[in-house]
Image: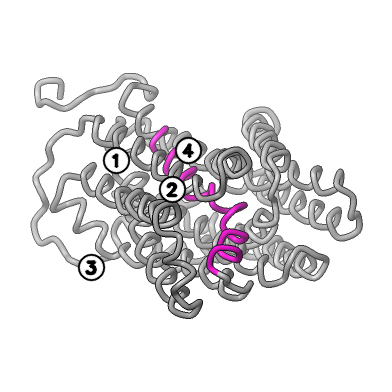
Amino acid sequence: MYTQNTPVHVRLWHKGFWALAFSNLLLAMSVFMFIPVMPSWLEVRMGFDVVQIAVLFALHGVGIYLLGPLCSMLVERYRRNKVCAFAISWTALTNISIFYLCKVHPEFFSLTDTSTMFVIMSVLQVVVSAMYGLSQMSLSGTLIIDVCESCQRTEANHSAAWFGRFGLVLGPVVGIVVDLLLGRDMVFLFSSAFSIVAISLVLMTNFPFRAPGENIKTFCTDRFFLTNGKWLFANLFLIMVVAGSIIVHYNDVISYLLMLGGFFIALLSQKFVFANAELKSEILSALVLFIAALLIMIFRGMQMAALSSAFLIGIGVGVAGARFLLFFIKLSRHCQRGTSQSSFFLTWQSGLAFGAALGLLFGKGSTGYVAALCLAVAALLMYHLFTHTWYMKNKSR
């Protein structure tokens, strides 16, 4: 093994894994930093109404699936890290182009009618989302797995996913600070910069050469979607729709920092609270926290109530996300680990996107929170009455 030009790592946290983990963080930040600033930017700069903005968010949840059936063929036929880097470069190039138009040719937006601009932005959203989906599927479903030993892969998937999870709160924090200090258009430049650094980290990581397999199918579900995990998909999708419908209304740094604090509590709870607890307790506890946060926002309109709910949402998202990731891994069969990672990412990301669209349509008020509360209760009942039992009967390891 040591003589075949293959890197062997006794420890998980070696240079290559650190590089890919931070690449995952930066890639997530480059996308999520638009959550608090994009709705108002689209309204002011483009003149879009709330329905058009919600459609653009929903298109992100659709676009990430489009190149999934090609993922396996691409990473088998071409260098895996270059496929990921090429996909990320589309995000960087698009954001730099928008920044250039905003600064050098701002008249482009005012001279183009709203309906034409909406079509252009919709096409851009679908293309960029498709490339983002491909980059994340190749990164989490192939590169992070390949850079570590087989006995370390579950820990690697779990740890790298937390880096992406932290991007959900650190990205918006950067977006808000850049908006306040440098202007909203500069967010596109910073997003591009994060993408470029992520590309550099991916390309600087060494991967052993692997000859492409025989009979490569152009379209397949390998490294794309775990078909036998449909009920995990449905349950986690509901949870993330609830999370997205709430997070889209956070537009201050404090709320996201409180979510970050909730993430750290979720990390500690996995070690000290749920270590010897019944398996079902994690998801049920997370959903109870979701429901508590929504009830606080419905019946207490004070700022302190909104901030406390952000902390609870952070704990709930952290606990549910980490546990469902392990569910996807343990449900997958031999050589399906990469597929399980892609399935989890698609569920997580599309749920957030459609939840954000739903939150924008309902607005920041009791009606939207009541709708989210109903979905949270439905997710809790589904998990308690069906999903957990189904998972225990069908898990492979």
When the figure is inspected, residue 342 is found, relative to residue 186, above or below; the finding is below
Mark 4 to mark 2 CA distance (whole Å): 10 Å
x then y, percent, for residue 122:
43, 71
Q: Which residue is mark 1?
A: 143
Which of 108/380 is in front?
108
Q: Which residue is mark 3?
A: 219
Residue 254 is inside the magenta segment: no
The quarter of the image holding the N terminus is top left
Instruction: Select label 4 or label 2 by which is in front.
Output: 4
Q: Secondary structure at mark 2?
A: helix
Left or right: residue 286 compared with residue 182: right
Mark 4 is surrounded, within 10 Å at the Cα level, by few (under 14), some (14 to 19) or many (20 or more) other residues, namely some
Q: Which residue is mark 4?
A: 158
Disc number placed over residue 84 in the picture, else none? none
Question: Which stretch did the figure color magenta?
Answer: 22-46
Which of 333/238 is in front?
238
Q: Secondary structure at mark 3?
A: loop
Q: Given contact means CB atoms under 8 Å apart, are the residues at marks 3 and 1 in contact?
A: no
Q: Earlier in the sequence, mark 1 or mark 2?
A: 1
Q: Which residue is mark 2?
A: 329
x then y, percent, for residue 266:
66, 36
